[in-house]
Amino acid sequence: MRSRRKKAKQNGLWKTLVSVIFTALIAGVFWTVNRYVPPQHLFWKPLDTSRPLGFATKQQLMALNLKPSESCMKLVRGAAGFNTVIADPKRPTSGAGKGVCGWDVAQVVYGTEDITFAPGESNMQCPLAVAVYLWQREVDALALKHFDQPLAKIHHYGSYSCRRQRGNGSGAWSEHAFANAWDVAAFELQDGTLINIKKDWDGPRKHKNFLRETRSAACDIFRVTLSPDYNAAHADHFHLDMGPGNACR
């Protein structure tokens, strides 16, 4: 009987020791990763707009939806060269969108110091604005890669529209109804060259490659990216949004 008790006690001690060692190893690995891996690759780190995209950038952007709006606003104010102002609250007082469409907190986004929007500014929910800021930087790098020209303008169809997804008055509300989506039509380079999604999606190889890489960059940032490959309704633009869905097409 004593032998059994002694053996059980020894087994218990071994289990405790193994558990302590395992916990210490896990803690050590976490400390090492947390200390030496760049923050853009760690989903528990806050987003830093000054850093390049990483494995966790998309998750860090998603986390902005769960934080107080002031956290996102602070991030926007700290984004180098980002040209924005706070948008006045907007809530329709009549029609089908009453009590649904609009926003309480949003940004009027003009672009950056070097890249502007055409025909003009766009109202955006704050996380969408941050995503656009990061994507502009990626598109600019791709413009230099493919055309040896920096990006000068992004031509768009707007962000806010109080409508449903199908545009027929039924179905789920579009993310556009909350200024949480943006439709992009073309990219203009510094020398005036225009790369148009409708005309150039299957156009010259250089244009095709550029547009597909800009879409890939968008997929790494936005929750939903829809292109001409999705359906005929998107033949002339990219739809980019930060809603609850998840798609890259």
Image: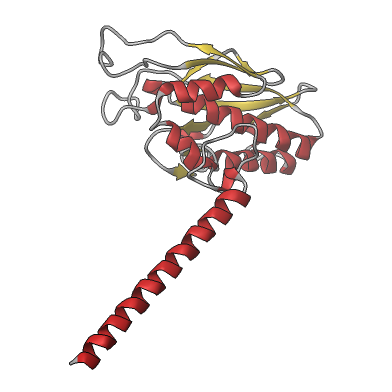
98 w.r.t. 19: above or below: above
Foreground residue among 216 and 73:
73
Residue 55 percent location from the top left of the image: 56, 48
Location of residue 211 by image quarter: top right
- Residue 125 at least partly seen: no
Residue 189 percent location from the top left of the image: 74, 25
**Which colour style is shown?**
secondary structure
Foreground residue among 33 and 130:
33
249 w.r.t. 174: above or below: below
Foreground residue among 14 and 130:
14
Residue 72 percent location from the top left of the image: 48, 25
x 24%, y 92%: residue? 3
- Residue 59 at least partly seen: yes
Foreground residue among 96 and 106:
106
x 64%, y 43%: residue? 213
| Quarter the N terminus occupies | bottom left
47 w.r.t. 100: above or below: below
Q: Residue 194 vs residue 64: left or right?
A: right
x 77%, y 39%: residue? 145
Location of residue 153 by image quarter: top right
Location of residue 174 by image quarter: top left
Residue 76 percent location from the top left of the image: 55, 22
Q: How many marks?
A: 0
x 49%, y 11%: residue? 86
Q: Residue 125 vs residue 153: left or right?
A: left
Residue extending furthest toward the left: 1
